[in-house]
Image (cartoon, rainbow, N blue to C red):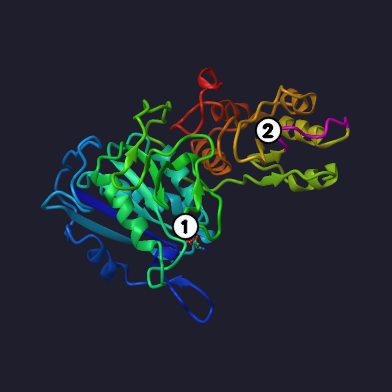
């Protein structure tokens, strides 16, 4: 088995500096100590088939002869600095090694890891090999750091035959990458998947969920990510129409409005719904999301939510904010705009959205 690592930055590769934590740990020196069963090599040979999760490889490593390669992206980033161009840098590196690696690990900062994992899931839908994105809350040198456990857990998930798709391993759980969201600044569990169960929970032995069929219509031969103007606006009681209008001037490509509950907004004729209706007429794709991490947007359930639907907004279903934002960037990068872009937001591209027929 050959695992290719793409190191993009984040606490997992940081060291202390007078200005605070910053990238600079010797990952190239640390990696071989963490995965002693793997030999560093140039990624040149054709991939082999990994074992299935029903017959896990013994120990914490891999079959004999396992190899790895590492790309360190430049510049290494605190993930607060990432943009859709950073996502594309990771995608390009994975695709460059797709002919020789059996599996991929992306090392990334936790702050925007769920955005990157979502972005990767759309662009790499056709990739045959699994990808696991991971990082840590504490740098590798810190006492009780979670860096080693997360990195070796990501590798172990792959050696056990994690299915194809983009996953996120953190705090002992393997989650679907486009279903995960960062929920804690300090907990070593850090991430939750509020609307779908974990794929696996680490332990002795690991517990794998029954494998569900892969969903999503995918997008063949996607164009690379480019950056599009997609503001995310949080509603709050009393937020004025003038403020909302100002935030939508000049008109963006799309907007995500994080409304209340199942997607409710004040219904007054001169309220936010009116501003959103005008935005739709101006060609903006208006997506209504919820401030509740768990559940789904149902715009018709309350009169307060029906107005947005009548105005031409679309609900984000049970997508995380990260999945919805990355999806808008992905679809806008494919050239979609307005109602067409809105229509595609309602389709399951890569498992990020529970299809209406299977919702309860
Ligand atoms: N600020 C860091 C980052 O996201 C946090 C982390 O990695 O945990 O790059």
> Is disc 2 surrounded by few (<14), some (14 to 19) or many (20+) residues within 10 Å?
some
Observer-side mark, 1 or 2, equals 1
Q: Report the front residue among 323 and 85.
A: 323
Residue on which disc 2 sits: 283
In this view, the residue farthest toward the left is: 65
Identity of the residue drawn at 43% across and 60% down: 136
Identity of the residue drawn at 19% across and 62% down: 36
Q: Report the front residue among 116 and 252.
A: 116
Q: Is residue 137 visible?
A: yes
User: Above or below — where is 58 with respect to 150?
Assistant: above
- Tell me whether circle 1 and circle 2 mark residues in contact (CB < 8 Å): no
Query: Residue 149 location in percent, x, y?
Result: 35, 58
Query: Residue 352 location in percent, x, y?
Result: 49, 34
Total count of labels: 2
Q: Earlier in the sequence, mark 1 or mark 2?
A: 1
Residue 32 is left or right of residue 179, and the answer is left
Residue 194 is left or right of residue 117, and the answer is right
Residue 275 is left or right of residue 223, and the answer is right
Query: Residue 81 location in percent, x, y?
Result: 52, 61
Residue on which disc 1 sits: 188
Residue 264 part of the magenta-drawn span: yes
Residue 207 part of the magenta-drawn span: no
User: Above or below — where is 343 with respect to 7?
Assistant: above
Mark 1 to mark 2: distance in Å?
43 Å
Write the start and end of the magenta stretch as one range: 260-269
């Amino acid at each position: 088995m050959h695992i290719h690592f793409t190191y993009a930055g984040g606490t997992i590769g940081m060291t202390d500096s007078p200005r605070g934590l910053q990238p600079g740990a010797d990952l190239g020196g640390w990696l071989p100590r963490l995965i002693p069963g793997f030999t560093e090599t140039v990624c040149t040979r054709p991939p082999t088939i990994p074992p299935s999760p029903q017959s896990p490889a013994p120990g914490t490593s891999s079959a004999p002869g396992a190899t790895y390669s590492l790309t360190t992206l430049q510049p290494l980033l605190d993930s607060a600095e990432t943009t859709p161009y950073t996502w594309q840098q990771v995608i390009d590196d994975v695709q460059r090694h797709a002919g020789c690696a059996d599996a991929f690990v992306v090392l990334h900062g936790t702050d925007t890891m769920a955005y990157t994992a979502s972005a990767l899931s759309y662009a790499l839908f056709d990739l045959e090999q699994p990808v696991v994105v991971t990082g840590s809350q504490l740098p590798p040198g810190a006492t009780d750091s979670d860096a080693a456990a997360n990195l070796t857990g990501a590798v172990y998930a792959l050696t056990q035959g994690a299915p194809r798709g983009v996953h996120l391993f953190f705090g002992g759980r393997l989650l679907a990458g486009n279903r995960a969201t960062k929920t804690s600044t300090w907990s070593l569990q850090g991430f939750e998947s509020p609307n779908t169960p974990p794929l696996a929970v680490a332990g002795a032995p690991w517990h794998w969920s029954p494998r569900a069929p892969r969903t999503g219509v995918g997008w063949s031969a996607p164009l690379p990510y480019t950056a599009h103007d997609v503001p995310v606006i949080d509603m709050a009681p009393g937020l004025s129409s003038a403020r909302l209008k100002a935030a939508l001037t000049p008109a963006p490509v799309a907007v995500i409005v994080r409304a209340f509950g199942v997607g409710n907004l004040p219904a007054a004729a001169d309220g936010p719904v009116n501003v959103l209706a005008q935005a739709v007429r101006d060609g903006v794709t208006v997506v209504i999301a919820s401030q509740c991490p768990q559940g789904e947007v149902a715009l018709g359930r309350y009169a307060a939510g029906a107005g947005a639907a009548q105005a031409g907004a679309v609900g984000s279903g049970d997508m995380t904010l990260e999945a919805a934002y990355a999806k808008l960037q992905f679809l806008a990068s494919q050239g979609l705009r307005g109602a067409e872009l809105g229509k595609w937001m309602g389709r399951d591209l890569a498992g990020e959205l529970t299809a209406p027929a299977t919702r309860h």
